[in-house]
Every structure is written in C-alpha cells, then in structure tokens.
C-alpha cells in the first residue's frame, strides 16, 4: 500500500462516507417553513424593522410562516439571568424556527449593539438542543448614507460562528429613509427587488436543507468525542 495515501490518525469506527440517501431522500416535512426575523433597532420608525416587515410579507407570499422578535426590553448580555422573559422569548423563537433573517442598521461602520446583543443571547446549545446549528440565515442591512456592506459582512461572520447555513445573496439598502413611503411601505426600486431575490433564495435553501439539517452538521470529531465519553461511562459502570 502506498503509505502516502494512508490515514492512520482517523478512527475508522467514527468515520463515515457521505450517505446520499440521508442527503437526497429524507422524509419531507409538509408544514410551512418557519422563519424568524430579527432587526437591530428600537426606534419608533426603525428602517431595519420596516425592511424586515417587507421581507416577511414576501416570505409569506412564498409560503413561509414568519415571526418577528421585538428587541425592546431585552437586557444586555450577562446583565440578567437566562430566565428573563425577553431572553426566554428570543430563545423560544430561535428554537421554533428553521431559518432566520437578520437585518441591522449600519452604525459607526458596524452592526448595532442591539443586533449583536440579540445574537449574544442565543446560545450554541440549550441542553442537548443546538438551536441554530444547520438552520438557514439571510443577512440584510440598512444605511442612512451611501451603500455599504460592513454590517452584512459582520453578520456573515456571526452566522458562521453560530453554525448557520448563511445563503450567498444579501441585501443592503442605502439611504433607507428615502426608500419608504408615508405608510411605512417600501417603494418599488432595485433595493426592493433585491430583498425579493434574497427571500426567494432563503426559501429554497430552507426547503432544501431543513429535513437533512441534522445530518449536514453530523461531524466526525463529535462522533469520536461521543464514542470516548460512552466508553468512559461503560467502564465506570463495570467498576
């Protein structure tokens, strides 16, 4: 055997080839895709909220069930216990959803603290449940000035960190105060069309992945660690 092709460090008992049956033929869910929308401002006329409301209408037209979280009253991370009502509400919604939309204003060249605080209250695990892992994410931002991508770029980093499947497309609305009418509805524009594009893509990725999400994030390293822990427990019982 060519030694250059061997993999002696791999634990063969925990190594798996990709299972096309689990990837392409899982039992299909029939309920509407569940999408949670988070916005990064508590202003009375919040343009990130208004953009999300337009996104929710598009998602509903595409067949999704949508819910939104109001960040007003959410405490700063670590400034309250996890049983705070707003924290519980946020975590319950994240557990409920199969995909998310994050939309933040850009402030001082970055996402807002309000946006980051919401994400910081979302844990990577809640007991045995990982509330974000394998779910889909679309990112958007609104700006008061010229078009920028600082906030969406940061949101992408956070999405990856939270083990979310962040879709390729994104939306950045420049001079957002000019893009909504007196009824707080978004005017027809290329910016609006891009939001439609993003929501279409989010729906496709959610439908494509939601029924195999657990398998997509099933990892060799975690199987190996679980096998070691199981062996320890079995050996402890035999003592």
Image: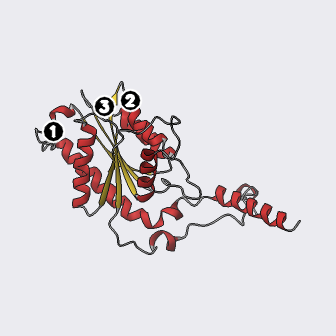
> Which quadrant of the figure contains the C terminus?
bottom right
- The residue pinned by badge 2 equals 110
Can residue 2 be seen by looking at this rendering?
Answer: no
Would you call the spot at circle 3 few (<14 residues within 10 Å), some (14-19), or many (20 or more)? some
Q: Which residue is mark 1?
A: 180
Badge 2 density bin: few <14, some 14–19, many ≥20, Cα 10 Å: some
Between residue 13 and residue 90, name the one nearer to us.
90
Secondary element type, mark 2: strand
In this view, the mark in front (3 or 2): 2
Alpha-carbon distance for marks 3 and 1?
18 Å
| Residue 148, label in figure | 3
Q: Secondary structure at mark 1?
A: loop
Q: CA distance from mark 3 to mark 2?
A: 10 Å
Q: Nearer the viewer, residue 159 or 98?
A: 98
Give the image location of residue 15, x and y in percent: 66, 64
Tell which circle, 3 or 2, labels the residue nearer the N-terminal end. 2
Q: Nearer the viewer, mark 2 or mark 1?
A: 1
Residue 2 lies left or right of residue 90; in this view the side is right
- Determine the residue positioned at 56% across, 52% down: 125
Local SS, label 3: loop
């Amino acid at each position: 055997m060519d030694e250059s092709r061997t993999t002696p460090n791999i634990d063969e008992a925990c190594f798996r080839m990709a299972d096309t049956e689990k990837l392409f033929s899982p039992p299909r869910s029939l309920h509407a895709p569940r999408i949670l929308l988070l916005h990064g401002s508590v202003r009375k006329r919040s343009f990130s909220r208004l953009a999300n409301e337009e996104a929710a209408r598009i998602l509903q037209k595409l067949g999704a069930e949508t819910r939104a979280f109001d960040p007003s009253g959410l405490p700063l991370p670590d400034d309250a216990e996890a049983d705070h009502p707003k924290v519980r509400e946020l975590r319950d919604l994240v557990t409920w959803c199969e995909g998310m939309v994050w939309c933040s204003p850009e402030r001082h060249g970055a996402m807002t603290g309000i946006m980051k605080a919401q994400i910081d209250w979302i844990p990577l695990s809640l007991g045995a449940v990982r509330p974000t892992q394998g779910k889909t994410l679309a990112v958007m931002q609104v700006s008061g000035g010229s078009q920028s991508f600082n906030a969406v770029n940061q949101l992408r980093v956070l999405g990856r960190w939270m083990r979310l499947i962040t879709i390729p497309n994104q939306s950045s609305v420049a001079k957002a105060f000019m893009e909504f009418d007196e009824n707080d509805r978004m005017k027809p524009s290329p910016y609006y069309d891009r939001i439609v594009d993003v929501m279409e893509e989010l729906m496709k990725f959610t439908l494509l992945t939601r029924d195999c999400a657990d398998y997509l994030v099933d990892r060799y390293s975690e199987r190996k660690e679980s096998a070691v822990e199981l062996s320890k427990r079995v050996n402890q019982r035999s003592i």
